[in-house]
Amino acid sequence: MTKRVAILISGGGSNMVSLVESMTGNHPARPVLVMSNDPNAGGLAKARALNVPTYAVDHKPFGKDRAGFEAALQDALEKARPDIICLAGFMRILTPAFTSQWEGRMLNIHPSLLPKYKGLHTHARALEAGDKEHGCSVHEVTAELDGGPILGQAKLAIDPDDTPDTLAARLLPLEHKLYPQVLQRYAAGDRTPLFIDG
Ligand code: GAR
């Protein structure tokens, strides 16, 4: 049975586009929804151009009411009936009450070689630490932020003159390579980690 995939974004959605474009032919999954917490996220228009239904739940009116925001997300997701949820540049922290509903069915891409640099500013932190390599990870989402089982990683060598911006720009194409491959394997039931050297 073809798996239904919902993709959650907050911004430009370049990872979302790479995921959507990968789900063709004999791929075991298809996109059914792209959702954002920002109604102005650039990725929403890109999803519509790719003929994927979109929906926005603006987090701002909810203020500190995370439960209310997540209930609205949950409502939209239940209508779309995804088998798999891909967080792709989704920049809101999700509470355990939400993640527990989708555990084993929700993936995230994070711009670091986890378990290093959970959270924000990953490129700057890798540079500050004097790391020789950097990368991105796709992992299952659990209650622990950026902490679930790793499903794939792609690595690159850090150049002496790299800045956080150049690192981010060099890493993004690797994210676009890694995430679709991991999703394809995951949708086919393969959870063994995939490692790519960029
Ligand atoms: C990507 O680099 C992704 O790894 C990162 O946000 C960017 C989204 O770009 N995600 C996180 O930092 C999650 N904590 P995109 O909107 O072009 O896919």
Image (spheres, rainbow, N blue to C red):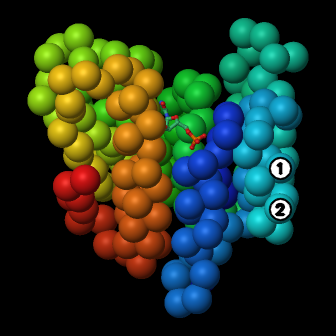
Nearer the observer, 13 or 32: 13
Say how many tags the image has. Answer: 2
Q: Label 1: how many residues lie within 10 Å, few (<14), some (14-19) or many (20+)? A: some
| Residue 75, image x, y percentages | 80, 45
Position of residue 75 relative to residue 60, above or below, is below
**Amino acid under label 2?**
Ala
Kind of element beneath mark 2: helix
Q: Specify whether residue 23 is in view.
A: yes
Nearer the observer, 182 or 1: 182
Residue lying furthest front: 161
| Residue 13, image x, y percentages | 65, 45
3D distance between C-alphas at marks 1 and 2: 6 Å
Position of residue 197 relative to residue 116, above or below, is below
Residue 107 - label = none
Residue 96 falls left or right of residue 35:
left
Location of the N terminus (image quadrant): bottom right
Residue 157 falls left or right of residue 34:
left
Q: Specify whether residue 142 is in view.
A: no
Residue 117 falls left or right of residue 14:
left
- What residue would you read off at disc 2? 49
Contact between labelled residues 2 and 1, with CB atoms less than 8 Å apart:
yes
Residue lying furthest bottom: 26
Residue 7 falls left or right of residue 170:
right
Position of residue 133 relative to residue 27, above or below, is above
Residue drawn at the location 63% of the way across and 57% of the way down? 17
**Amino acid under label 1?**
Ala
- What residue would you read off at disc 1? 45
Mark 2 beta carbon near ligand 1 (under 8 Å): no
